[in-house]
Image: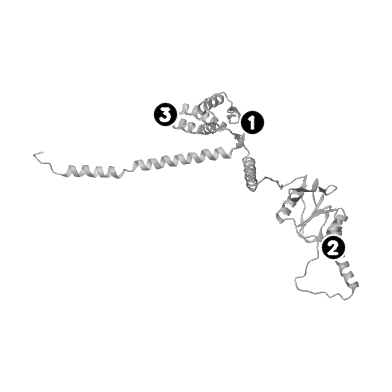
Amino acid sequence: MQHAGARPKIALLNAALEVKKTEVSAEIRIRDPAQMQAFLREKENFLKGFVDAIVRTGANVVLCQKGIDDLAQHYLAKAGIYAARRVKESDMKRLAKATGGRIVSKIGEISKDDLGSAKEVYERKIGEDEMTFVTGCKNPRSVSVLLRGGTEHVVDELERSLEDAISVVAVVVEDGGYVYGGGAIEMEVAADLKGYAVSVGGREQLAIEAFANALEIVPRTLAENAGMDPIDTLIDLRSAHGEGKAAQGVNPLEGKVSDMKRLGVLEPLRVPRQAIASATDAAVMVLRIDDAVASKPTRMEEKGKKGDKKEESEPTSDFD
């Protein structure tokens, strides 16, 4: 494991620490060994100038999006600077957000104000890959999560689960609210609706009670899937919510009704709200379609009506 040393001051470069190739074809002919030495010395001074510009800023970590010449790497290491090359552009942008640094395209113009900071920068080998970790950022606005698994399928499932979890947390933050899971919120709403239905009376009471019974399908289904008795579970839930225990829900792990708040079983407010709204819209649509079909006579009924009219129009005989 290789560490960056003192508290990291990170330089983010979008420029190559190497001698660029010319865009046109060129040929250098050297006839004297001294000229060869002068050529190599000039290259060395050119790269050392880059490194000196970085050293003057006080940076001790260099993360470069492009290449770093071996000679430049030597000077950086000699100055006690940890360097990593060929960093992906997406990672550079995330590093800029996490460390608070700025990506510099001209090395000669880099200053200490462009540097980012972190608590620790180190390199560690994981599996067959060597990875650089930047940890302990003061106000990270971007983070990376490392997922590992035995097979590609396992990693894909881990990634899907992580995305779902992050999305759930994001929805809770956006809406600013959550409810208890395990069918607790559905039972609480159903209990309130049944109490409200009594005060309404009439045929509307039957509709409200039917809506409340439909909500109880959620904890009932949870109980059935967990191998629990659905009727006993609903009775226990109704009793608990009748006593004001709004957080009581189905606990499939223990096969009983438990306090979802204590177990930490929560879900975003948007999920049950959207589910109830979508189910209600679907039910209303079915009822409307049913009314439309019922109001239109079938072909058999139309034929029957035509037959009755024909029989009425035929004259009757005195001998009948």
Horizontal side of residue 126 vs 175, given as left or right: right
Q: Which residue is mark 1?
A: 263
Horizontal side of residue 263 vs 194, given as left or right: right
Residue 237's spot in the image, x, y percent? 55, 27
Mark 1 crowdedness (10 Å alpha carbons): few <14, some 14-19, many ≥20: few
Which residue occupies 60% across, 37% down? 267
Q: Which residue is mark 2?
A: 47
Disc on the earlier residue, 2 or 3: 2
Q: Which residue is mark 3?
A: 202
Residue 16's spot in the image, x, y percent? 78, 61
Disc on the earlier residue, 1 or 3: 3
Question: Which element is circle 1 on?
Answer: helix
Question: Does the CB distance between marks 1 and 3 fall below 8 Å?
Answer: no
Number of the front mark, 1 or 3 = 1
* Residue in front for this viewpoint, 9 or 120: 120
Mark 3 crowdedness (10 Å alpha carbons): few <14, some 14-19, many ≥20: few
Circle 1: residue type:
Leu
| Residue 302, above or below 186 | below
Mark 2 crowdedness (10 Å alpha carbons): few <14, some 14-19, many ≥20: many
| Residue 6, above or below 233 | below
Residue 83's spot in the image, x, y percent? 81, 54
- Label 2 to label 3: alpha-carbon separation: 89 Å
Question: Which element is circle 2 on?
Answer: helix
Circle 2: residue type:
Leu
